[in-house]
Amino acid sequence: EEAVQAHLMVQVQMQAQGQVQARGLQVQAEVRSAHQAAAAAVAAQEVSAAVAAAARLVPPKKLLRRPGMPECQYFLRTGDCQYGLACKWDHPERPGPTLNSLGFPLRPDQMPCQFYMQTASCKFGTACRFNHPEGVEAAAGLALMLKDASSGI
């Protein structure tokens, strides 16, 4: 009877050890999966940031001059034309806006871009119609640090 109990005890221990090993393999697989997902998210964020930076550096597309035709009003307001080469209106040469050190337009006669004032970035780039004054990046960084500090991060 003691031999049977010892044999049962060994079987129970082996079964428990097998369950522990299986759970360990499952946890390792979950950790690997989480690391891969995090790496993919970081890579996607880096690509997104690189695309946004590249978009600010791409020179504006060249649009056709059509002397004698009225000027494209959308082009005059924004510096861009959604119809591109198919637009029937004139797209006169015009100097682009003066840019700040981050590549955003300086338009002192306009209101400040609220998003730029908070983050020192603007998704509209040179097409934004608001002002992007110099020196905001330091203030935006300080505001973000204060916000993080007040939220307990």
Image (cartoon, rainbow, N blue to C red):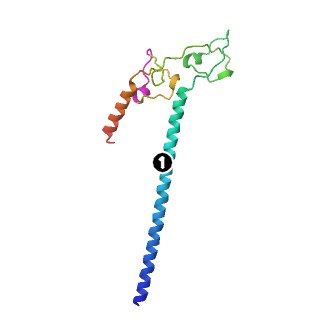
The residue lying toward the viewer, choosing from 126 and 128, is 126
Q: Which element type, helix, strand or loop, lies under badge 1?
A: helix
Disc 1 target residue: 38
| Residue 38 picture location, percent across and down | 48, 48
Q: Is residue 33 left or right of residue 3?
A: right
Q: Residue at x 34, y 35 (%)?
A: 145
Q: Residue at x 41, y 84 (%)?
A: 6
Is 34 rendered above or below residue 94?
Answer: below
**Quadrant of the frame with the C terminus:** top left
115 within the magenta span: yes
> Farthest residue in the bottom direction?
1
Q: What is the three-letter code of the residue carrying label 1?
A: Ala
68 within the magenta span: no
Q: Is residue 95 left or right of residue 23?
A: right
| Residue 31 picture location, percent across and down | 46, 56
Is 25 rendered above or below residue 68?
Answer: below
Q: Residues within 10 Å of mark 1 (few under 14, many from 20)?
A: few
The quarter of the picture where residue 131 lies is top left
Q: Residue at x 39, y 89 (%)?
A: 2
| Residue 139 picture location, percent across and down | 36, 27
Q: So how many labels did they put on this image?
A: 1
**Quadrant of the frame with the N terminus:** bottom left
> Farthest residue in the top direction?
68
Residue range corresponding to the magenta coloring: 108-118
Q: Residue at x 44, y 84 (%)?
A: 7
The residue lying toward the viewer, choosing from 53 and 105, is 53
